[in-house]
Image (spheres, rainbow, N blue to C red):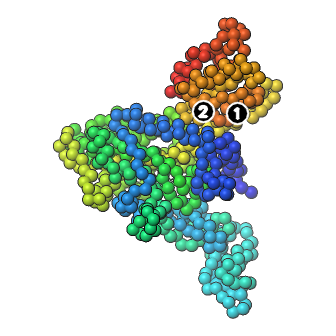
């Protein structure tokens, strides 16, 4: 029997996944062919939601700041880029395979298991055939040893023995071992590094000289183009370059819906700063307790790092992810990459656990120095103010679009018990997206579809609002059902055109009802006030 808490988590996640499919947020890629593991498509609502997230990030990073500019670089770059960054040599995960089913796992993601391991030195089948490969099966306390023998026989059958007799059974007590498949107890292979980059060939000849990679992150293009962007944008340090785009990783175990995919999008900023020694040459370092949101000329990497963590958390709050829904993980010194000075992961409390949404790293001057070394082109900067030449240091907030969209969906999904028109209790499923990111901002409904005068007016209101906002027009079914459909899509506002709009009560001529998704309250608003009011509510 599984743990009831875990069951609840799974149930919630299953509901979210199935609703995502039914309502057109996210579904499997190539579904008609059985899907392809680790790849996902965004349907009409999902595509709007994702676009809103990216547009708002872009606007917050570039258009609302003076010190960040954008870049849109190619996905395939010169392979030297990945040599310089270290990806060709080290961008790998340790991988293990189940010896029985060949299922592949990431070694560092195996749930530790305890119990008794049954070891065999090999098996024979009585016809003179033998297999000398050792094998083991781990079974938890209380499980019959015959299970281990059955699994071991299956393994030796796969090694070519028809009717195996197991040799030299011995047992070993194991505590928190990660050497066995948690699904069936079978021994796993030793961990082997597996490079996560997707390889391809550029041009018609598949030779090693033509090999290239689909980028596993968007950041490297920013470093490779640092000098060019600096020159054309006429920025001075500190300043940043940001990019949104696809990244590809041949993840060993794609899982948790879109959380770990093989194709995903990143939103990355490289914020270039002066080395501490230069920034602090004149005034020394700032006091320990500086306000985190007021940059100063003598800020070093620590202050800029804290600044960006704070900026990013505020940004998440501005699209409805509260601080309580987030968590933080400061990597321990022994976990840091050799060049990183500090890394903090911003986590979201998903139903399947608190997991990384974004990593914010202080990366020193590692990346630019590497590209300088591998390309032979200078990556340094002449600081006119300080009269100093140096390779800039960098703070990197790096977020995943798909993980954020999933977090927004998980946070938005609510089931509420409400009373319908007939006084009956019913369950209302509502996606409480922040209006800023909601796929559709307003639903427009004529009260009745068979009254041309109502439909005509409703279409006029739709066409008017459409100039400013994403609008969905719906005339099918009872008005209550139409509200529910928009609740499920996460539409924050609903506008209904009724007979009062047409002047049945003269004082209400050219007014409509405006319904709020979350409170379900309705107010009466003049059509001419609708657009400014809604725009104000959205900002
Ligand atoms: P993880 O430890 O979860 O594999 P990471 O630390 O390798 O992630 P980074 O290389 O820091 O991730 O990438 C920055 C961001 O890109 C992550 O915070 C995440 O939001 C996103 N990301 C990375 N890998 C994936 C993936 N396989 N699927 C979806 N998003 C991803």
Tell me the element at label 1: helix
Residue at the spot 45% in from the left edge and 65% down from the top edge:
204
Image quadrant assignment for residue 502: top right
Tell me the element at label 2: loop
- Can you see residue 57? yes
> Residue 279 versus residue 399: which sits nearer the camera?
399
The residue beneath circle 2 is 440
Seen as rendered, the residue at the extreme bottom is 128
Q: In this picture, is 349 found above or below 56?
A: below
* Number of residues whose C-alpha sits closer than 10 Å to that of mark 2, classed few (under 14), some (14–19) or many (20 or more): many
User: What's the mark number on residue 325?
Assistant: none
Q: Is 361 on the left-hand or right-hand side of 250? A: left
Q: In this picture, is 74 found above or below 417?
A: below
> Residue 44 versus residue 106: which sits nearer the camera?
44
> Residue 288 versus residue 252: which sits nearer the camera?
252
Residue at the spot 44% in from the left edge and 67% down from the top edge:
205
* Number of residues whose C-alpha sits closer than 10 Å to that of mark 1, classed few (under 14), some (14–19) or many (20 or more): some
Residue 35 percent coordinates (x, y)? 64, 56
Residue at mark 2 to residue at mark 1: CA–CA distance: 12 Å
The residue beneath circle 1 is 485
Image quadrant assignment for residue 291: top left
Residue 283 percent coordinates (x, y)? 22, 38
Q: Is 409 on the left-hand or right-hand side of 210? A: right
> Disc 2 vs disc 1: Cβ atoms closer than 8 Å?
no
Q: In this picture, is 51 found above or below 525?
A: below
């Amino acid at each position: 029997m599984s743990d009831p808490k875990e069951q609840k988590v799974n149930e919630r996640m299953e509901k979210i996944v199935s609703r995502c499919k039914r309502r057109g947020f996210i579904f499997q890629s190539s579904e008609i062919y059985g899907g392809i593991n680790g790849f996902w498509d965004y349907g009409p609502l999902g595509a709007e939601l994702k676009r809103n997230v990216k547009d708002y990030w872009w606007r917050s990073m570039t258009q609302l700041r003076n010190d960040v500019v954008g870049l849109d670089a190619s996905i395939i770059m010169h392979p030297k880029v990945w040599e310089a960054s270290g990806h060709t040599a080290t961008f790998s995960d340790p991988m293990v395979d189940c010896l029985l089913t060949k299922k592949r796992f990431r070694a560092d993601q195996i749930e530790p298991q305890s119990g008794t391991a049954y070891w065999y030195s090999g098996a024979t089948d009585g016809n003179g055939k033998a297999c000398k490969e050792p094998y083991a099966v781990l079974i938890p306390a209380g499980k019959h040893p015959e299970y281990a023998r059955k699994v071991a026989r299956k393994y030796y059958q796969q090694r070519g023995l028809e009717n195996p007799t197991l040799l030299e059974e011995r047992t070993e007590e194991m505590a928190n071992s990660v050497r066995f498949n948690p699904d069936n107890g079978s021994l796993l292979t030793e961990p082997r590094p597996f490079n996560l980059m997707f390889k391809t060939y550029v041009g018609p000849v598949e030779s090693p000289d033509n090999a290239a990679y689909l980028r596993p992150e968007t950041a490297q293009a920013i470093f490779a183009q640092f000098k060019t962007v600096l020159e054309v944008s006429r920025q001075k340090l500190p300043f940043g370059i940001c990019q949104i785009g696809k990244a590809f990783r041949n993840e060993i175990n794609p899982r948790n819906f879109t959380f770990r995919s093989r194709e995903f999008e990143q939103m990355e900023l490289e914020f270039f700063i002066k080395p501490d020694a230069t920034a602090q040459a004149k005034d020394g370092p700032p006091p320990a307790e500086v306000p985190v949101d007021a940059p100063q000329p003598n800020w070093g990497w620590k202050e800029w790092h804290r600044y960006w963590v704070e900026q990013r958390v505020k940004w998440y709050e501005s699209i409805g992810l509260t601080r309580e829904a987030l968590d933080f993980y400061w990597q321990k010194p022994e976990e840091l990459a050799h060049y990183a000075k500090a890394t903090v992961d911003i986590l979201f409390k998903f139903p399947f656990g608190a997991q990384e949404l974004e990593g914010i790293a202080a990366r020193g001057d590692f990346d630019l120095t590497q590209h300088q070394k591998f390309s032979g082109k200078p990556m340094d900067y002449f600081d006119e103010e300080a009269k100093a030449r140096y390779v800039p240091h960098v703070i990197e907030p790096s977020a995943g679009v798909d993980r954020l969209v999933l977090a927004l969906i998980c946070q938005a999904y609510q089931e509420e018990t409400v009373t319908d028109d007939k006084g009956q209790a019913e369950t209302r499923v509502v996606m409480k997206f922040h209006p800023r990111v909601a796929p559709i901002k307003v639903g427009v409904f004529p009260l009745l579809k068979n009254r041309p005068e109502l439909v005509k007016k409703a279409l006029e209101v739709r066409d008017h609002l459409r100039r400013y906002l994403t609008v969905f027009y719906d005339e099918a079914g009872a008005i209550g059902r139409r509200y529910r459909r928009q609740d499920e899509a996460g539409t924050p506002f609903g506008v209904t055109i009724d007979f009062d709009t047409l002047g049945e009560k003269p004082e209400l001529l050219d007014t409509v009802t405006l319904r709020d998704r979350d409170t379900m309250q309705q107010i009466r608003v003049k059509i001419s006030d609708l657009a400014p009011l809604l725009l104000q509510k959205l900002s």
